[in-house]
Image (cartoon, coloured by chain):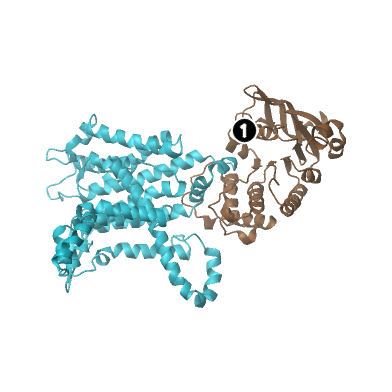
């Protein structure tokens, strides 16, 4: 491990999280390698979303710390964490429903270019050709260019997810966090989303993906951590994890099947 | 032109034309006609249209774009008025130093009130702004009497310093010698039009600040304000620190309100605490919603509509009704007047209230939505013939109708 350390983008160090008497997370150690897709799987209530919320600063860990690229994320505000290069896709797409699809994608681009705040009242949006061109380019990538002037609220759920992904991609994040990116999607939408994520993978973006759907996980992940009862019970390449008897008991061969 | 695209330029030119032609457009009935009392083209009322238009344009930058409802903007209106009257008292009757001071001081007030109030959102934000405005109002009546002259209201006295005032200089509000109340009356047949310097002064300022608001609406800043209204959480996770954006919007709209308050005192050299009362704050909310929150022109229409009602509709008393319905048989005449009377004259609030309810229920987008729907009806008919030419140019320019 020591040799690989310089390639580790995200370190979750001995994180514990308790809610009252409930141990939601215990002894969590994660190391996410640069350019890799790291999946976190586990049955319902295993603590996956809690872990993601601790990483992005929405929840403060009871103990331990999250380190991104040498900086401690713990205690930072969401916008500060984003400015450091961490973008997030939510379980339920978080978008700007009243804005056009194009503006949805342009807003995060301004955050990337201008920082967390810029008093740019006198510039005109239509003068921002570079940002608009890039947004259009990314909308082409995700297959939404034809809807660029529609209100984002009118998109289907699958399209909203793709747009949210575009909102993250335009920032060229160093780390992309995906919380159940295919939850509640039809098979068709799931497959197009997987294709899209595979396309991103080729660009070498580091991703942490939380997922329920095994089909999605095994088609994308380089490494899988299995969470059950707030602990990591297994970790490794997809094939190792698939064959781990502990995992089969806790998850794959459990009551759910 | 002015960095705007063709559509916005056309829009701005129309607004400029309407504003400058107001003294003619609002005087549609000849003096001799019994409808002459519906004419609104007299200086005092037109000035109010422009001033409250400015107030509402500024309020709309905060409320229309970000959705944050301030119930305390009248405080800035009052601050603006006091600033201008103080400059009369200390320097002379030139309105310019006072107006600059009004914008600066209301901006400073807005920084403080906004900084504290914006720590909360939703109803708590509204209540905090309301609390600040009521506090200002009560302070103006009590401990701040040395500055505000309490209940009497602030005005210029003969023993005030007025260090710049010369014997020859105008003893009325003016701009470098051009007196606000100067007016030229033009008679054309039975029509009489009044062109007043004060109105044109406020109208030109209104056009300038309207242009500024148009620029803000079309800027990345404006887009981010809309995004705050739409989904603040997403913006946080997209790397935007929303607080300074909100504060900037609050301060800009506070400065607009201060300018409007200053102009009130520029037209009439008085300032009273009642300008800061919560009813005045509520009025600008009504104007914005009635006209169409978040649209560029809506708040101005709303402001004009409410001021028209307040000044014209309220003048229809029982005597006027008798002249209208005099041709009916006596019994019927009295009956109709009994029914109509509560809605006009002093009852104008009732009619305005009912209209407000109707607009909010049936036209949530305000009067602008109504106008757009009417325009839509006409467009449908001519659509087929124009479709071929228009589709290409409109596809890229299309924006929500404003």
The foreground one among B399 and B144 is B399
Residue B16 visible in the displayed image: yes
Residue B161: horizontal and vertical position, in percent? 16, 38
Can you say whether B242 is above or below B49 in the image?
Answer: above
Residue B91 x %, y %: 21, 42
The chain carrying label 1 is A
| Residue B226 vs residue A158, the one in the foreground | A158
Identify the image quadrant of residue A51: top right
Name the foreground residue: A183 vs A16. A183
Chain A, chosen colour in render: brown
Q: Specify whether residue A102 is in view.
A: no
The residue that mark 1 highlights is: A57
Q: Quadrant of the N terminus of chain A?
A: top right
Seen in the image, is B260 located left or right of residue A207? left
In this view, B57 is above or below B133: below
> Residue B128: x and y, percent?
39, 35
Residue B225, x across and y down, in percent = 49, 47
Q: Residue furthest bottom?
A: B385
Q: Colour of chain B?
A: cyan
Give SS at disc 1.
Answer: loop
């Amino acid at each position: 491990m020591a040799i690989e350390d310089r390639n580790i983008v995200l370190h979750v160090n001995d994180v514990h999280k308790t809610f009252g008497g409930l141990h939601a997370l215990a002894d969590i150690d994660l190391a996410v390698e640069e350019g890799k897709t790291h999946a976190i799987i586990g049955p319902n209530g295993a603590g996956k979303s809690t872990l993601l919320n601790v990483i992005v600063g929405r929840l403060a860990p009871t103990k331990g710390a999250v380190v991104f690229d040498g900086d401690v994320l713990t205690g930072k505000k969401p916008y500060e964490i984003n400015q450091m290069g961490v973008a997030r896709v939510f379980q339920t797409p978080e978008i700007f429903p009243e804005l056009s699809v194009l503006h949805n994608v342009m807003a995060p681009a301004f955050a990337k270019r201008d920082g967390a705040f810029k008093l740019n009242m006198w510039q005109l949006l239509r003068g921002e050709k570079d940002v608009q061109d890039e947004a259009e380019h990314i909308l082409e990538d995700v297959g939404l260019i034809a809807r660029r002037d529609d209100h984002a609220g009118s998109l289907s759920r699958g399209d909203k997810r793709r747009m949210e992904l575009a909102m993250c991609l335009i920032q060229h994040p160093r780390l992309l966090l995906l919380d159940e990116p295919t939850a509640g999607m039809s098979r068709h939408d799931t497959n197009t989303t997987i294709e899209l994520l595979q396309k991103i993978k080729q660009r070498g973006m580091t991703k942490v993906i939380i997922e329920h759907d095994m089909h999605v996980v095994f088609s994308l992940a380089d490494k899988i951590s299995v969470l059950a009862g707030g602990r990591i019970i297994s970790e490794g390449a997809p094939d190792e994890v698939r064959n781990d008897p502990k995992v089969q008991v806790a998850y794959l061969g459990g009551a759910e099947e | 032109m002015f960095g705007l695209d063709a559509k916005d330029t056309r829009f701005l030119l129309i607004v400029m034309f309407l504003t400058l032609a107001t003294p003619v457009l609002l005087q549609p009935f000849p003096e001799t006609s019994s409808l002459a009392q519906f004419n609104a083209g007299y200086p005092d009322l037109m000035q109010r249209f422009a001033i409250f238009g400015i107030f509402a344009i500024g309020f709309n930058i905060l409320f229309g774009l970000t959705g944050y409802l301030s119930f305390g903007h009248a405080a800035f209106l009052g601050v603006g008025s006091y600033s201008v009257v103080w400059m009369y008292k200390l320097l002379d009757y030139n309105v310019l130093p006072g107006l600059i001071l009004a914008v600066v001081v209301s901006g400073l007030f807005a920084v403080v009130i906004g900084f504290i109030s914006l720590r909360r959102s939703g109803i708590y934000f509204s209540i905090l702004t309301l609390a600040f405005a009521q506090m200002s109002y009560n302070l103006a009546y009590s401990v701040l009497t040395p500055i505000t002259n309490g209940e009497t209201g602030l005005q210029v006295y003969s023993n005030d310093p007025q260090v710049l005032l010369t014997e020859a200089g105008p003893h009325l509000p003016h701009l470098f010698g051009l007196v606000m109340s100067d007016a030229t009356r033009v008679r054309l047949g039975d029509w009489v039009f009044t062109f007043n310097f004060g109105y044109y002064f406020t109208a030109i300022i209104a056009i300038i600040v309207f242009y500024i608001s148009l620029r803000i609406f079309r800027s990345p800043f404006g887009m981010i304000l809309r995004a705050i209204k739409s989904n603040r959480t997403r913006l946080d996770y997209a790397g935007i620190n929303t607080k300074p954006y909100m504060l900037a919007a609050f301060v800009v709209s506070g400065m607009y309100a201060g300018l409007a308050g200053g102009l009130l005192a520029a037209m009439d050299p008085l300032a009273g605490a009642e300008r800061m009362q919560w009813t005045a704050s509520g009025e600008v909310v009504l104007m914005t919603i009635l006209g169409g929150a978040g649209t560029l022109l809506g708040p101005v229409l709303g402001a004009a509509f409410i001021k028209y009602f307040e000044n014209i509709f309220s003048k229809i008393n029982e005597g006027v009704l008798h002249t209208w319905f005099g041709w009916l048989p006596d019994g019927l005449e009295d009956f109709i007047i009994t029914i109509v009377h509560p809605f006009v004259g002093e009852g104008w609030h009732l009619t305005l209230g009912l209209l407000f309810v109707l607009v909010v229920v049936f036209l949530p987008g305000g009067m602008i939505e109504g106008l757009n729907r009417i325009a839509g009806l006409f467009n449908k008919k001519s659509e087929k013939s124009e479709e071929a030419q228009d589709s290409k140019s409109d596809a890229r320019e299309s924006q929500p109708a404003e």
